[in-house]
Amino acid sequence: MTGLRGSFLPTRRLVLKVGSSVVLLGVGTVLPIPFAASAANDRYPEAAFSQKDSAEAIRLLYGRVAEQTDRIKLDAPDIAENGAVVPVSATTTLTDVTSIAFVVPENPNPLAAYYRLPPGTMPSVANRLKMAKTGDVVAIVEAGGKLYSTSREVKVTVGGCGG
Amino acid sequence: MASSIRVRAITNGEITDVQTLIQHPMDSGFIKGENGELIPAHFIQELTFEHQGRTVFVADWGTAVSKDPYVKFSFKGGSKGDDLKISWIDNKGETDATTVKIQ
């Protein structure tokens, strides 16, 4: 039995060595887009929500940049008297929509909401957001593996973060 | 205890419209209270809707969603009397859930 075990050992070491080099290679290829997978899995994207920069929040959430489109209809008031409650909705004619997100770049944490839409759910969401001050609201739609955005300015009379 | 979740789900035979209101402070962590100290962040992070056991909508929220959040969406399918389960979890680990019948 000892002889047998001995003859197995080199093979096992070889396997381990090959295995670890594959793992290293994997880390190397994944690193440039560390959070690209976060939008695809089911976990709450904590890092994107706590980001202070909107472009960085979008990159963390999707691992890519959105292109402007006129195929998203973003509804929000031109003037919001109360920044604590700003009704915002988005609907799109894009197909294969898998998510809709709202970003308020002027807020301390720009990513406001991220909605995951399984097949069969309509690409249309309405909600109410806080806006710290006058600035854009951005709707981001993920459709067919691509990212699209539309923005709209809302003038805020009383900010939503001053209480 | 009364549920924090109020839902109205109405189907027209093809599409079910779902409107939801939740009682929750949605404290951002950026506002000072009466004692002059920041009120700690306390907000719903994830809100999930399941129709007959199938997830039809997931909301991931940050601190910028308004107090007592409102959200509206629609999905294909859903018949009168079907179950729609709604559940949320916040950043303190508190949760609530309710099940309503589609009207």
Image (tube, rainbow, N blue to C red):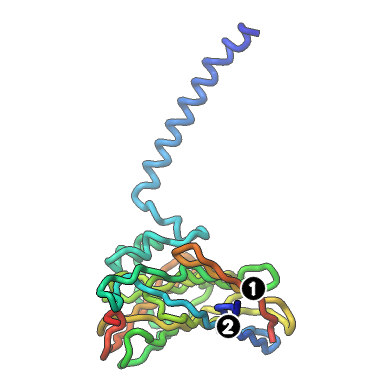
Under tag 2, what secondary structure? strand
Mark drawn on residue A31: none
Residue appearing at x 47%, y 83% in the figure = A126
Q: Determine the residue located farthest toward the top in the rendered image.
A: A3
> Which residue type carries mark 1?
Lys
Check the image and report above or below for B6 versus A5. Answer: below
Under tag 1, what secondary structure? strand
Tell me where residue A95 appears, x and y as whole percent.
52, 75
Q: Where, quadrant-wise, is the C terminus of chain A in this rendering?
A: bottom left
Residue appearing at x 63%, y 71% in the figure = B50
Tell me where residue B42 appears, x and y as whole percent.
41, 69
Q: Chain of mark 2?
A: B
Residue B89 visible in the snapshot: yes
Mark drawn on residue B85: 1
Q: Quadrant of residue B67?
A: bottom left
Residue appearing at x 58%, y 83% in the figure = B6
Q: Determine the residue located farthest toward the front in the rendered image.
A: B35
Looking at this view, is B41 or A109 the one in front? B41
Check the image and report above or below for A13 versus B41. Answer: above
Q: Chain of mark 1?
A: B
Residue A140 visible in the snapshot: no
Tell me where residue B8 appears, x and y as whole percent.
61, 86
Circle nearer the N terminus (1, 2): 2
- Which residue is identified by label 2? B6
Q: Where, quadrant-wise, is the N terminus of chain A in this rendering?
A: top right
